[in-house]
Image: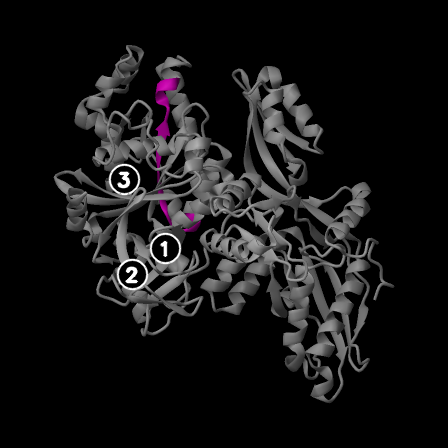
Amino acid sequence: MSKELDAIKEVINDPEHIRNIAIAAHIDHGKTTLTDNLLARAGMISEKLAGDQRFMDFDDQEAERGITIYAANVSMVHEHDGQDYLINLIDTPGHVDFGGDVTRAMRAVDGVVVLVDAVDGVMPQTETVMKQALNEGVKPVLFINKVDRLIEEMQLTPEEMQKRFVEIIREANTALRKYAEEELADEWQMKVDNGTVAFGSALKNWAISAPYMQKAGISFGDIIDRVNDGDHEGLREDAPIEEVVLDMVVEHLVNPQEAAQRRIGKVWPGDPESDIGKSMESHDQDGPLVGVVTNVEDDEHAGTIATARLFSGTVREGDELYGIGSQKTERAQQVGIYSGPRKLTVDEVPCGNIAALTGPDFTTGETFILDGEESIQAFEQIEHVFEPVVTKSIEPKRTSDLPKLIEALRKRAKEDNTIKIQIDEETGETLVSGLGELHIEAKVERFLEEKGIDINVSEPIVVFREGISEKSPEVTGKSPNRHNQLQITVEPIPNSVRTFLKEEYKELKMQSSDDTEIRDALVEAGMDKDEADNIMDVYEENMFINASRGIKSLREIQEYLLDAFQEFCDEGPLANEPVIGLKVKLHDAKLHEDAIHRGPAQMIPATKDALKRGFLQAQPQLIEPKQELRIDTPSETMGDAMTEVSNRRGDVMDMEEEGGSSVIFCKLPVEELFGFEADLKSATNGKGFFSLIDIIFEPLMMDLQDEKILEIRERKGMKEELPSLEEQ
């Protein structure tokens, strides 16, 4: 332990010799096995166990399920060309339900090793992790794993193998071009000849890259011959995987100082010319402290431990840290660095590193500084590529456990910001939303069980959305005192504009103080120029526009109108589900001259009244979440797999044949997906599996609308009748 700590301390202050990296991939492509090999190199685990031990899967569930659920941190020292380098590494989950951990990890690192199974090739989750990395300005390199299977099982010729590698590299670079900024897409292309692509077998502990072949005098033909001879042990000696991969990391992934010049402007919306902006871009270890919490965990012995990436200054034991978002001060009782499940305590950790801070009770995503220093703009919120679509109702079996349950759930939501908790103060019902059934089961139900809280859990609930398909007539909303009236219309936002609001608007709004730039981007997305000039509010995928010719006292009531608009969007009139794709236009208003008669108690109901009237006259509809899936199955069971899709209101969009395998691209309602994995396995003799490509929202079939609205209203304890204009 002390030798390991001494080696780390030697390098921790030298940013040029630090690499912060994640290992990311589709599920079962071999991330944790590769990490084992890298740890063996660092002397942390036995080389004999590397590949089998799954050292980083130290949660009981991870061992049981054979998958990674939590992102895990470790720091190690790697010698390259006679110099020591500190590698701060995060092993991330591959299952899409735990994608939030991947997103948070990308805020902490500067580079990522993207792992691809040579047999499966680039899969949907491979593209998702690249999108997550590139959104955070993180540079990728590529490792093609399980090459031994191409030789031993599939018995491909060298030409066939080369063709497969070319295809994998091409697809990875296509994803790079799709999500990276234009100038970086060319600079970051992954190529065999420059060493940004490596090949190997994490399970058999060997790897190769073009630079290493030259250095070691090994050809690819030698690799094939030796694998065919079963000489994995010899290959392990001559081409050790950890040396090849970590050399690639050191040579091609940037150090934190270089990364800061590019990343700070991407993830921090403050002024780059300010003192703090310059300190972060230069990675000044003596500058003001700035860090971002990327993970929070609860240790039964030590208390709360926050994982933080430090972007400026140095954090020391005993520092009082101020959270910009929570506006509270917390003490760093201990400062350390990670070594898998262990934390190695040090006196201080300078910027450029990933630190373990014991004590601060911050939420994931929190920006913190030293207490007493000048406040700064917080870092951009860490946003996941998918939103929670599955909800379960959870209640304690013993009423006395309710406070414990609520406290435990709030703690869980603080640790994982893709878990949403909603507590109904009237009924005591607690709704937990997550990215999928497994997400809630593994991160919430199991967590509560470990805390000794016995719970009743409902069947999964799917959160629908509400929207409209036509423009409404002009409608009037009246205040309770009848002294104020609003004239509005509502209409659907065009899909191109909605896509812009969902994917680009927030980032542009944070990075640009120029309203003209935002307006031009909206016009380019398909919005009318006059409307884009008069936006009063954008909320989720909805907008409120001032289409009036000048309403006296509008400025005084604007806040009430927008509060009502946001409340309406949170709970639509059909079944209190969130509203999406709604454009509201305010055309006119008749307001009482005396401000006391047009306060919030009058204007909020008037606005909601108008919104409801307009909404119900614009062809309202329930909109359901669907998953776009890729299903891989042997060709002989393709028909059975397609039957499973059609039995669940699914649509097949495309099909491909590849050797003896079939690939089906389809979309299925999330509501119909529960139990789908088990049924697909059963229908395909255990050989079929699916991957998530995207989550989309589409209107529910018309003949199911009324039934579903009534079902949701009943579940929520609302009036069991369809909403109407008369119900005012």
Residue at 23% over, 22% down: 236
Residue with the mark numbered 1: 303
Magenta stretch: give its range.
134-149
Residue at 62% over, 70% down: 536
- Amino acid carrying mark 2 in the image: Gln
Q: Which mark is residue 333?
A: 2
Residue at 59% over, 43% down: 695
Question: Could you say which quadrant of the image residue 214 lies in?
Answer: top left
Pair 2/3: label in front = 2
- Whether residue 413 is in magenta: the answer is no
Alpha-carbon span between mark 2 and mark 1: 10 Å
Badge 2 density bin: few <14, some 14–19, many ≥20, Cα 10 Å: some
Specify which label sits upstream in the sequence, 2 or 3: 3
Alpha-carbon span between mark 3 and mark 1: 34 Å
Pair 3/1: label in front = 1
Q: Is residue 211 above or below residue 226?
A: below
Q: Which mark is residue 249?
A: 3
| Farthest left residue in view | 82
